[in-house]
Image (spheres, helix red, strand yellow):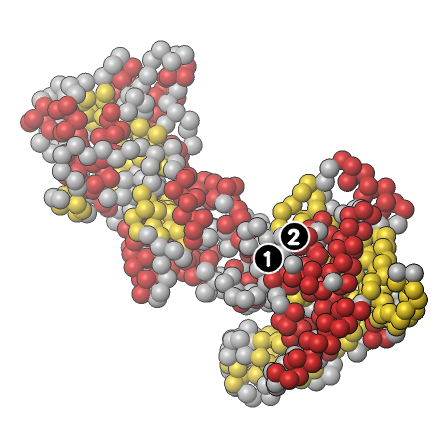
Amino acid sequence: MPLLTYRDALNEAMREEMARDDRVFLMGEEVAEYDGAYKVSRGLLKEFGPLRVVDTPIAELGFAGIGVGAAMVGLRPIIEFMTWNFALLAIDQIVNSAAKMRYMSGGQVGCPIVFRGPGGSALQLAAQHSQSFESWYAHIPGLKVLTPGTPADAKGLLKSAIRDDDPVVFIEGEMLYNVKGEVPEGEHLVPIGKADVKRAGSDVTLVCYSKTVTVALKAADQLAAEGINAEVVDLRTIRPMDTETVLNSVGRTHRCVVVEEGWSFAGVGAQVVDVIQQYAFDELDAPVLRVTGADVQMPYNKQLERAAKADPAKVIAAVKRVLYLA
Amino acid sequence: MASKVLLEALSPTMEEGRLVEWKKNEGDPVRVGDVIAEVETDKAVMELVARGEGVLLKQLVPAGTTAAVASLVGIIGQPDEDISDLLGGSGAAPAPAKVAVTPPASPPSSPAASLSSPASPPEPSAGGRTKASPLARKVARERGLDLGGIAGSGPEGRIVLRDLDKAAPATGAAFAPAAAGAFHDVPLTQIRKTIAKRLALSLGPIPTFYLTTEVDMDRTWEARAALNEAGKRAGADAVKVSFNDIIMKATAAALTAHPACNAWWQDDRIRYWNEVHLSVAVAVEDGLITPVVRHADRKSLREISVEVKEMAGRARERRLKPEEYTGGTFSVSNLGMFDIDQFTAIINPPEAGILAVGSIVEQAVVKQGVIVPGRRLRLTMSCDHRVIDGATGAAFLRTLKGMLENPLAIVY
C-alpha cells in the first residue's frame, strides 16, 4: 500500500470524487489559486478549472450559504473552512439551514453538502484558533460529524461524506496533515458511523478519535511495556456514533478511558460515558474516566499549551486509576 | 506514606472482632497481603492482611481486645516515619464513619487536576453500605458470593473484580454454584403468593410446619456395622462411617428425587437448586455453625464422612471460611448423640427445609403381628410452607425413610 500524508489522502479523495461526479465542487478561502491554506486542494484548480474550484472572499456565512443553496438545487458542494474556528461565523447556515432543510421541507429538499477543514489546536495558535468544536455539531440532529485520525480513514471517510445525501461536518486534525500512513489503492470507502479497533487489548478500552488516536496508541505502547494491554477504539464518526463497537470492547475489558481533545464539559466523551453507563453498567469495574483538554482558554505559552492538552502521560495515569493501580 | 490498619469486616455479619493474636510485631517488615493478625469474628477466626507496605510501626490494640469494625488497630509505614497525625487523639478510637460522598460543587475543571488527585488508600467500607463496582456485584451474584464478607481494595473500600478473585477464584475449587444449570428460578404463581402471604400472617416470618416419621434402622445398623468391620480389616486409611454420614448421604439422594424440597425462598420467586449443598449443624463451644458439604449428591459416603469430620473439626477451632458455611440448599441437624428421641429444628433461611435427627432407640416393635426387638429412629422435617406443601414434604420423607430402611436404595 502506498504511504500518503493525511493531506494528500484528502486531496486524492476530492480529486477522485470530482472526477467521478461533476456535481461536486470545492469552494472556500484560498482553495484555488493558492492550493489551499494547508495545501489540501493542491492541483485541483488546474485539473477541474475555476467553475469547480472557487476562491471566495473572507465571508464564511456568505459562502457557506451559497453552498447550502447549491446543495438544495442538486449540486454537491464541498465547503472548506480555513479552520473550524472561522466556521463560527457560518454556524447559522450549518445548523439552521443545512441540518434542517430535509425536515422542514417535508423531505422535498435535501442538502448533500460537506463542510470541511482543520479543527483543534496546532502549535501556539492561542485561544481563538485552537478550539475543538465537534461536540457542538454532534449536538445537532441532522448533521453527521466525521473526525478521521489516519490518512486511510481521512480518504475513505471524505469520499463517503461527499457521496452522502445529507450534510456532513468533516473535521480534520490540523496537526495530522503531515502524518503519513498506508492508504489502500483504488476505490477506498470507509463507512460513516463505523468505529475501528486500532489496537486489540484486554485490560482497558481507550476510546479516541482524530488526533487523540495517536495519543491513545502511544499510551497503549507504553502501557504494554508494563504488561497492560489497552484496546484502542477509534470512533472515526462522532455522529452517528458506533456504540456497538464501544460496548463490545468495554464488555470485554470492563474499564474505559475516553481521550478527546476538546473541553470536558458536555464534550464528546460525556456522550460516550452516557452510552456505557446506560448499556454496560454491569460490566464496569471502575468509573469511566476522561482525558480531555484543560477547561481553560488555550494558552499561547508553549509550556502551558502542552500542559493543557491530552497526552499519553495523562492517559496512562487515567488507565492506572481505572485498573486500581494508582 | 504510612497507612492505617483498620479492623475489616471479615464475615458478612461481623460488627466487631476480637484481636486474637498479632502475627507481626512492631518493627517487623510487612508486605501487602501478609497476615498481620488473627481476628475472631462472630463466626470464625480469620486473618487480617496488610493493605500497605513497609514496617508495622504500631500495634494500637493489644491481643485479646475486642474492637469495632473499621477501628484503627495498627499503622504500617516507613521505619522512621512520623505518624503522630495518624495517631492524633486516642489511638484505638474507631475510625470516623464514612459520610456519603459529596460531589464537588462544580465538576473537576481540568483532567490534569482530577488525574493528579491521589487515590484514596484502600479502606474497608465502614458502617455504611458495601461499596462494590457494578461488575463485582454481577460476578458476586453469579458466584454466589456475599460481598459483605469481602474486603474491598478500591478507593473508599470499593470491592472490585480482583477482590472477588482473591475471595473465590472463578476457576478454583471454591463454591461457584452459579455455574450454568446450578438452579432454576420459578416466579411465584398466584396460589404460591397467596399461600405465602396467608401462612406468614399466621406463623411468621417463616411459616413452618413439621413432619415426623419413624424409621426402622435395623438394616442400616447392620450395613454400617459390616462396612466399618470391613474397613477395620482393610487397614489404616479406613474411615469409620457414622449414622449421621449415612443419613446425610441418603438425604442428598432423596433431595435429588424431590427437588421441590431442595430450594430457597427468594421473596418474589423460588430458587430450585439442581445441585445439593447440604448444611450440617455442628455444635461449637458457644453456639453452632453449619459447614456445607458441596455437591453432597455427587459424593460417596466415604467422601461425605471425611469431609464432615474435617470441617466439623475446623468449625470447633473456628477456622471455617465464610464460603464454607454459607450457600447450603438443605440442612441436617442431629441430636441423636444426646439421647434426644425427636425434636424440631429451626429453618436456616433461605433454605426451605431442615431435617432433625433423633437417636436410634432400641425398642419393642411389632413385625408381622409379633412383638420383636427393633431399632427405631425418629426424623422430623421442618418445612417452609411457602415453598414446600405438606404432601411434598411427606413424599420426600417417605423416600428418605425407604432409603434408610433399605440402604441399597440410596445408590439405586
Q: Is residue B117 above or below residue A146?
A: below
> Which SS class for mark 2?
strand
- For the residue pair A246 and A46, the one nearer the viewer reads as A246
Q: Position of residue B47 (x, y in %)?
A: 62, 76
Disc 1 on helix, strand or loop? Answer: loop
Label 2 crowd bin: few (<14), some (14–19), many (20+), radius 10 Å: many
Q: Nearer the viewer, mark 1 or mark 2?
A: 2
Q: Note whether residue B266 is visible.
A: no
Viewer-side residue, B44 vs B99: B44
The location of residue A48, given as percent across then percent down, is 9, 23
> On the image, numbered disc 1 is attached to which residue?
B177
Which of pointers 1 and 2 lies earlier in the amino acid sequence?
A: 1
Residue type at mark 1: give it: Pro
Left or right of A240, for residue B362:
right
User: Marks 1 and 2: CB-CB under 8 Å?
Assistant: yes
Q: Chain of mark 1?
A: B
| Towards the viewer: B32 or B27 | B32
Percent x, y of residue B139: 55, 55
Quarter of image, res A203: bottom left
**What residue sits right under mark 2 in the picture?**
B273
> Which circle marks residue B228 in the picture?
none
Q: Say which amino acid is labelled 2.
A: Trp
Residue A172, by quadrant, is top left
Give how far across and how far down residue B96 sits, in percent.
69, 67
Label 2 chain ID: B
Q: Residue at x 17, y 21 (%)?
A: A21
Note whether A4 is above or below A95 in the view shown.
Answer: below
